[in-house]
Image (tube, grey):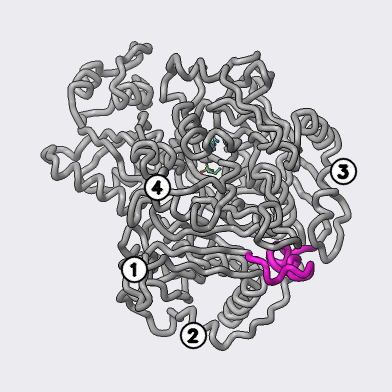
Amino acid sequence: MSQTQGSTESGSTMESILDEHRHFKPSKAFSSNAHIKSMAEYEKMHKRSVDDPEGFWADVASELHWFKKWEEVLDWRLPDAKWFVGGTTNICYNCIDRQIDAGLGNHTAIVWEGEPIVDEDGHHAGGEPEVRKLSYYDLRREVSRFANALKGLGVQKGDVVTIYMPMVPELAIAMLACARIGAVHSIIFGGFSASAIRDRVEDGKSKIVITADGGWRRGKVVPLKDNVDEALTLTDLVDTVVVLERCQNDIHMVDGRDHWWSDLTATASEHCPAEEMYSEDLLFILYTSGSTGKPKGIMHTTGGYMVYTYLTSRYTFDLHPRQLCDEELNEQCRGDMYWCTADIGWITGHSYIIYGLLPNRVPTLMYEGAPDFPEKDRFWDIIERHKVTKFYTAPTAIRAFMKWGREWIDKHDISSLKVLGTVGEPINPEAWMWYHKVIGNEKCPIVDTWWQTETGGHMLTPLPGATTTTPGSCTKPFFGIDAAVVNSEGEEVGENEGGILVIRKPWPSMLRGIYGNRERFIETYWSKIEGFYTAGDGARKDENGNFWIMGRIDDVIVVAGHNLGTMEVESALVSHDAVAEAAVVGFPHEIKGTGIAAFATLVGGIEETDKLKAEIRDHVAKELGPISKPDKLRFTPALPKTRSGKIMRRLLRDIAAGREITGDVTTLEDKGIVEKLQKQTD
Ligand code: WT7
């Protein structure tokens, strides 16, 4: 394992080593108003949180609403954790009703902006973008209506509801409605294809899909309903589809199966009590790629997830709600406007657009479309108009902004910004510095948050008022997190030595399993090192106790912040008639961080043409969605294999990166193949 920060594939540069010695302390002005004001305060609280996790988490949970208090804070029988055992609550109630109960019903819960710039007649040209603001009252009314609509369709507590929607308020409404009535949502990112929908519907045994006619992306309609129709020709499990009208594009409604959202909600009552849920009742399933086979349905339950995302949101972003003082006049009184640019279809959106944010009484902004529509300054325009204070995005986006140039930013006043966040993959120091200087104007702390779909919430992260940051490091464990870098025996490795990142104690929002696959749950997370949760990432800890993520140690590659299993892409490749065998690896990519390089052998007799290359790449995009489309594809008469038949991926990684092959090749079966591959262009 290499010892540089960043993905193991990005290599080390002199500059990245120098950057480790560049430290950024929060300013006194910032710290004095922050929740956590100093390293000493962080350390004291962190110590208490790991020495007495039950006391610490009980205090946090007590800030939220419970119908019935828990009997036991934690029941830990490795690998199964139960938090707030016997307690009953409802996360939707804590997102909405708790604020209304406190007299804040008229405060803004969600601010939404659509992609099209529409004029008064709804024409997509000139004029102002479409903006909707929902107060907690509005949100409760809409959520309750839709919850009643779901009940009317026969949805019951515990049923799995599939949601495949664009980034519109109704997506938030649909998920909160499920939570309100105790249905389990399974949200599928709108960029995924029909076969991904089929797989997830079947794995979750879901009989209902909620979708929209389409969503706007870069001025075009994403045909969500068509994708659902296609998926439903591949499975007959689903008997009900709810369709939101968003783009007024032509779609086909199936009689008896398909219902318009507006018809269902028009007649539904706006009163729907929040169901009393046990803390350990399943809240949602969210699929993430594994190193082998089909995606894993990660399970998250109610109470622990709610408490952990609530606290991480507050401290990581240093959230401050609007005060009941001089209203909008004074900056302190106005409170935060928070914007996370992720799609709700990813865990980032689940935890840090909706579930962690709303209970903190801070408005959360949702944007439907692309960052470069109609121009490359859309994000800065949004920040200026909505006075965004806390901004959370991904390194892949930051690298794109860098490439587009700072003139797009300079057109706008983004001085409202106070904290900048990043997530999804290691951020290279150059991008970190650019984020710090150009977006943060050297005054905004950067929080580089390391976590996973499985962890539910932030695990390693700076706290903006306390932590001294260093470009490229996600710094220190959050409260309650006992993280370590160990060797294969589970022993902590030395300072700055690479090893396996593990979590040694349970935390409230940890995954409760893989849906329908106990064995895989144990095998993937609990078998590598006895007694510890293994995340699948390599890391090292420096002399200041800061963690540096070194990239995946399994066959998962993180492309533009999205976790993709190389196996999945390989299966999609071989599902093309012309492809006999395929291997996929990551390679350093300027914008995406990691790009997808594919190697394929063709079925005998088939000619290797550029046209076929394009066709095969498109085939993968159609099977798995556009993010999985290989950036490079090379044909080869055979894949480089060891004598025992194992594909030598590290050779392919070198070839894809255009590097010289330095490692041992003595086990390689046919050396000629590697030479041929190196000579080829993409
Ligand atoms: C994997 C988890 C957590 C939401 C987005 C991705 C990588 C995530 C960082 C970071 C370095 C990171 C890891 C992790 N990752 N954040 N700040 N620094 N690497 O969720 O799809 O479950 O992927 O993303 O490799 O294991 P996910």
The Cα–Cα distance between marks 4 and 1, rounded to whole angstroms, is 39 Å
Along the line of sight, which residue is nearer the eye, 183 or 146? 146
Q: Percent position (x, y) of residue 288?
A: 51, 47
Please name the amino acid that badge 2 sits on.
Asp
Local crowd at mark 1 within 10 Å, few (<14), some, or many (≥20)? some
Point out the stretch of residues depicted in magenta: 88-108
- Against 391, residue 135 (above or below) is below
Q: Which residue is mark 4?
A: 411
The Cα–Cα distance between marks 2 and 1, rounded to whole angstroms, is 20 Å
Label 1 secondary element: helix
Residue 263 marker: 2
Residue 428 marker: none
Query: Mark 3 vs mark 4: which is more N-terminal?
Result: 3
Please name the amino acid that badge 4 sits on.
Lys
Q: Which residue is mark 1?
A: 226
User: In which quadrant will I find the C terminus?
Assistant: top left
Please name the amino acid that badge 3 sits on.
Gly
Please name the amino acid that badge 1 sits on.
Asp
Query: Mark 2 vs mark 1: which is more N-terminal?
Result: 1
The Cα–Cα distance between marks 3 and 1, rounded to whole angstroms, is 51 Å
Of the two numbered discs 3 and 4 in the rendering, the one whose residue sits closer to the viewer: 4
Local crowd at mark 2 within 10 Å, few (<14), some, or many (≥20)? few
Q: Which residue is mark 3?
A: 55
* The magenta stretch spans residue 101: yes
Label 3 secondary element: helix
Of the two numbered discs 2 and 1 in the rendering, the one whose residue sits closer to the viewer: 2
Query: Mark 3 vs mark 2: which is more N-terminal?
Result: 3
Query: Mark 4 vs mark 1: which is more N-terminal?
Result: 1
